[in-house]
Image (cartoon, rainbow, N blue to C red):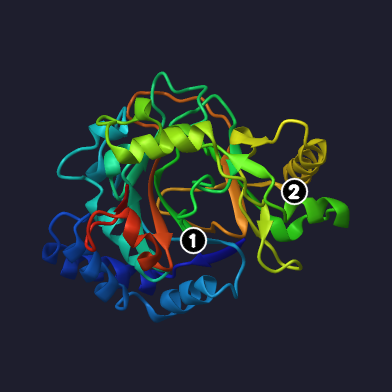
Amino acid sequence: MYKLELNADEVRDIERLLDDVEGEFGALDTEESLKLATLHAQELPRDVRARINAFRLGELDGVLVVSGYRVDQERVGPTPGHWRERPEPSTSRREELLLLMIGSLLGDPFAWGTQQDGRLIHDVLPIAGHENEQLGSSSEALLTWHTEDAFHPLRGDFLLLGCLRNPYGAQTTVGYVDALELPESVRDVLFEPRFGIRPDESHLAKNNSDAEGKAFEDIEEMDRAPEPIAVLFGDRNAPFVRADPYFMDVAEGDDEARSALDAFAKAMDDRMFDVVLGDGDFIVIDNYRVVHGRKPFKARHDGTDRWLKRINITVDLRKSRASRPARDDRAIR
């Protein structure tokens, strides 16, 4: 993990930049705001831009944590009880704007029409009733490690999270595919398209307000009959990864694929380590090189719970054009 600690001058420059430009933005999920975020991202401190660019190019570790930004806890107010209950206008608008600027240095933020009602910026927080679900809104269950949106061919290249608060030190877990030592016979199988990944539950109709239309029909089809894919791909000596074991299947009778998947999962389990995000920390995860999850914690549901902001980043927005209703619509449907 590579950690970038902002110094006092960099924090001051970032806060001054937010002061200067915040008034130029309307709703942050519009194409105009995203263009402005890309423009103003180039005014972030030079060293911050240089390190994030190095990370984008794969020159740094697959996990980057940027620390030192200060969150005004009184301004952001209590943690909502549900992502639908986020205050409007957002009390964490400054943090969301900084999130978009950092994301714009990596690529283009995008949304899913089938996740959190198509919002570009997600709220990750514990929801009462989700305690034992395989969702980012769970708490008491182990959120099994995974590639973000592993089931979908248009999944993001990077995942970016900003921590508003984490009072009990809930642990994010991360693991690197590069760190795995696998027998060549297992690696051979993992490079073959013999594995299915079903959509995770955040994309299902039951977890969205308006769950009609072709996008949800496609999700249902992916759930019924996932397309066989390879777990490892790219350079054999430094492979990329696409996996979500909790939602993965192999063809009936393919014992070799099942054994390889089990060996892969055990090897990754043995290599996972913890990252505790504090107030004002931003973490960037390379979604092709690293898997992530979260350890259980006890939610309070009293307005003081862990609260993260999340966006997905693609390095090639054009590849999803056929799945977006319009050029200036960032939601894949």
Task: Tell me the residue that label 1 is attached to.
Answer: 157
Name the front one of labels 1 and 2: 1
Q: Which quadrant would the N terminus be assigned to in this image?
A: bottom right
Give above or below for 257 relative to 71.
above
Cα–Cα gap, marks 1 and 2: 22 Å
**Residue 155 located left or right of residue 327:** right
Residue at 39%, 21% (x, y): give it. 128
- The picture places residue 72, in percent across and down from the top left corner, at 29, 49
For label 2, the SS is helix
Label 1 amino acid? Asp
Query: Is 25 on the left-hand or right-hand side of 325?
Result: left
In this orientation, which residue lies closer to the viewer: 12 or 247?
247
Element under disc 1: loop
The 10 Å Cα crowd at callout 1, few under 14, some 14 to 19, many 20 or more, is many
Q: Amino acid at mark 2?
A: Arg
Where does residue 212 sit, x and y in percent of width and height? 27, 32
Instruction: Let me know if residue 245 appears in the view.
Output: yes
What is the x, y in percent for residue 167?
A: 45, 37
Badge 2: residue crowd in 10 Å (few <14, some 14–19, many ≥20): some
Residue closer to the observer: 229 or 77: 229
Find disc 2 in the rendering and name its residue: 271
Q: Residue at x 70, y 35 (%)?
A: 251
Q: Name the foreground residue: 235 vs 321.
A: 321
Q: Nearer the viewer, residue 36 or 274?
A: 36
